[in-house]
Each structure stands twice: as structure tokens, then as C-alpha cells.
Image (spheres, rainbow, N blue to C red):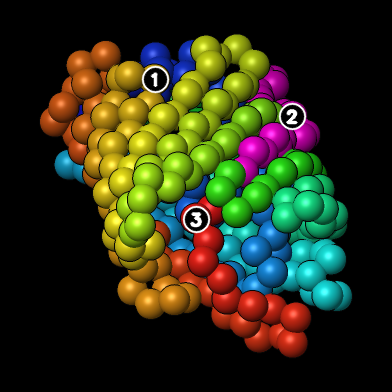
Amino acid sequence: MKKLYFLILILISQIDIANAQQDPLYAQYINNPMVINPAYTGINNLLNASLSYRRQWSGFNDAPTTTALSAHSSFFDNKIGGGLLLVRDQLGSTVNTQFNVTYAYKIEFTEHTLSFGLQTGVLNLREDNSELNPKDADDDVFTNDQNITKFNFGAGVILKGDDFFLGLSIPRLVNNQEQFGTLQSEVYKRHLYLSGGYIYHLGTGLALKMAGLLKSVSGSPLSMDYNAAIVLRDKYTFGVLSRNFQTYGLLAQLNISDNLRFGYVFEVPTNKSVGTSFTSHELTLTVDFAVLDFHFLNERYF
């Protein structure tokens, strides 16, 4: 239990918000931007399914774990996209579950795609206070277990070509608050994401893939992810990443076949974060299918 309290203090110091649920971290957002931007829905003109699992600060009891499952496809001659997104994020006794239905309308022009996306669904926050030992047992926040469900609505836009993409999104537009006895507390604050990536073809079978993600939320400093990777023969990807120059890591992806990809990320925080003892690991499995007459499997980098 002392470790749980220490973990909570670390989180508060990192995000500067003590009472609002934050979006989970995704190191491999570049492989499945749908987790942060509904405009990615159906953008590659096929059926895509992705499963990812992230364990933050491995070795620390009650550290965050995140599981994300998505499936989306293009419809009506690839003009629109539709999909589902399920995310389960757990930190100690708190479990945050998000379910969204996503939609995108795509405009094709000069080998580029402009996609406008919407999503709607619910956020559920459960807190099992029986696992806690608060100093003030009569505090309204801790007297009863919490089970809160809130409506969600989000939007985004992506401009994508064969070798690049640029996206802007607010996946959860509604700031949510909840009354705990006499205390009103924030359940969620909206996040703004600006993401982009580009691949430079260096020669036959060799390319440099670069990407970045800027995240903004009211009351917290800006967060910036950077990564760069070498792509060999369109099959093997190896690279490095950093988050705010406080966490560094390695990333790898193997294209097992034309439609199946496996990715892995290993992260080490510095002493500016939580220290090098608590590493993070993220696994992603992605599969593509051409199931409709107008679907097609193609070589893609984003």
C-alpha cells in the first residue's frame, strides 16, 4: 500500500493534476493512430484490427496497465469509415474503461486523403476504495466505491499521403465532473493531439521513418513524443524514441506477412521522471484484411 501511495504522488508530480483522469500513454500510436484520432477510421481502404498492451513502470506494484482493442473498415467505395474502439486503463484500484463508435468521411485528391472523423461513446471510471487506507476515513471521496459513467464525443482530422500523415484531434471533447458528497471533482479533462510522420526513402529497401506527437491538456505542461526508425526491405523496423527528453526507448516492428505486423517498445525513464528502475513495455499486433470488393492490401507505413 505504501507503494501505491508513492505511485500516486509520482503521477501527480508528473501531470500537475491531482483529481482528473488523464489519457493513457501510447508509444506505438504511429502504428494505430485511431486510439487518439477517429479520422484514422478506414483511412487505408481495408479492414484493420489492432490489439495493444502496455505495462507502465514494470516492477512497481499497482503501476498503470493499458489494453486497447480497435477494429475499423472503409465502406461505400472507400468513401466513409466505421469502427469500434475499446480501451481499458488501470492504475492501482482505479479502472478507466472507454468504448467508442467511430466514423470518418474521406475526400480523395491528387494521391492524398483528407479524412474527417467523429466518435461517440461512454467513459466508465471505477474506484475500489476497499483497497485503500486513507488518512481521513470520513473523506467523501473514499467513503464509498465509485462507479461513474459519462457520455463522450470526439473529433479529428487527418491529411495522409503514401509517405506522410498529419493529424489533429480531440478524442474526448467533454470535460466531466462528478459530485462526491460535498466535494465536486474533475473526472476527465479534454486532451488536444497534434501528430505527424514522414518516411524518407534512402535507397532500395532502405528508408528513414520519423514521427512526433504533441499533447496538450489544460493545467499541465505540453508533452512531446519523438521517434525515428530505420525500415529495411519494408519488413523490419528498428528505432529510438523519447518523451519530453525524460524517457527514452527502443522500438521494433516485424511485418510477419503482407497483412500481419507485430510491434514492441521498451522504455526507460530517467531520474527526471521516476528513475531508471521502472521500465515500460508495449506490445502491438495489427492485421489487415481486404474483405470487400473495393478493399485492397497495399504497402503502407502509417
Q: Callout 3: 10 Å neighbours few (<14), some, many (20+)?
A: some
Say which residue appears at 41% left-offset and 30% top-offset.
226
Say which residue appears at 69% left-offset and 78% top-offset.
295
Please report contact status of discs 1 and 2: CB closer than 8 Å, yes or no: no
Is 256 displayed left or right of 51 in the figure?
Answer: left
Q: Can residue 190 be seen here? A: yes
Reading the image, the residue beneath label 3 is 301
The amino acid beneath tag 1 is: Asn
Q: How many numbered circles are shown? A: 3
Reading the image, the residue beneath label 2 is 175
Separation of residues labelled 3 and 2 (CA atoms): 34 Å
Q: Residue 137, relative to residue 106: is it above or below?
A: above
Q: For the N terminus, which image quadrant?
A: top left
Magenta segment:
165-189
Mark 3 or mark 2, earlier in chain: 2
* Mark 3 secondary-structure assignment: loop
Q: Is residue 170 magenta?
A: yes
Residue 66: % across, % down = 43, 50
In the rendered structure, find residue 27 and report the number of the disc placed on it: none
Q: Residue furthest front?
A: 203
Residue 146: % across, % down = 58, 42
* Mark 1 secondary-structure assignment: loop
In the rendered structure, find residue 244 and report the number of the disc placed on it: 1
